[in-house]
Amino acid sequence: MTKFPEDLQILISALKKLPGIGSRTAERFAFEFINWSSEELTHFGHLLADIRNKIPPCPICGCLTDLGHCRFCDTTIRDSRSLCLLASARDAFAIEETRTFRGLYHVIEHLLSPLDGRYTDTLRVDRIESRLRQHQVQEVIIAFDSTLEGDATALYLKEKLSMLPVKITRLAFGLPVGSSIDHIDGGTLSRALSGRQIL
């Protein structure tokens, strides 16, 4: 098999880091980029280089901000009595589409995964506890993917937060085991939110 030029191989390897992108798809994308004009490539490169500066995570909740303003932290339009814990800022947008939840969000640092070097000491539970006290939160909703890592993290946080006077719930029926929140349709996600159970 003929090897691709070295720079093309580097590009293919970079594209394969994207979720759901295998070797064949990465190769197709790479060859498609080669056909783009210099102007298109330059524009795309600037978009990638600036995206983290233009849409930074909120220092309070971890969701993505818009021009420095976090609409998810605005307690004038959101119910501060409930706090929804997420593993990814992307999940906030999936839940918002259901129009079921009007509380606050909090994106944790990561899900627990000892094999990947992600342990409990970097979860920053103190930040969650601080927000619970600040807003006198009455319910914590754990909205992690139904995976081994999601389950382990949910149980750990339940144990750590159970010392506080809050009800702890987790998304209930409607979420298949092994599923990702951003792949669930709005109706199923809405039912899961409505039917959440005490953890």
Image (tube, grey):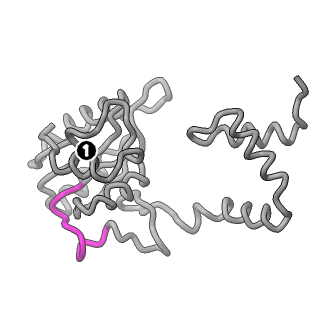
Quarter residue 192 falls in: top left
Q: Which structural element holds mark 1? A: strand
Residue 142 position (above or below residue 1):
below
Q: What stretch is highlighted in magenta?
A: 73-83
Q: Is residue 34 above or below residue 112?
A: below
Q: Which residue is drawn at 27% across and 36% down?
A: 154
Q: Which of 45 and 135 is in front in this view?
A: 45
- Quadrant of the image for the N terminus? top right
Compared to residue 1, the image places residue 154 above or below, namely below
In the figure, is residue 137 to the left or right of 157?
left
Residue at figure coordinates x 23%, y 69% from the top left: 78
Identify the image quadrant of residue 36: bottom right
Amino acid under label 1?
Ile
Residue 45 position, x and y percent, is 74, 60
Where residue 85 appears, as percent x and y from the top left, is: 29, 49
Q: Quadrant of the C terminus?
A: top left
Residue 132 placement, left or right of 3: left
Percent position (x, y) of residue 121? 37, 36
Disc 1 packing (10 Å; few <14; some 14–19; many ≥20) = many
Q: Mark 1 points at which residue?
A: 142
In the picture, measured across the screen, residue 1 lies left or right of residue 33, that is: right
In this view, the residue in front, 78 or 179, is 179
Q: Quadrant of residue 65?
A: bottom left
Q: Nearer the viewer, residue 72 or 185?
A: 185
Estimate the x, y position of residue 27 in percent, counting from the top left: 76, 39
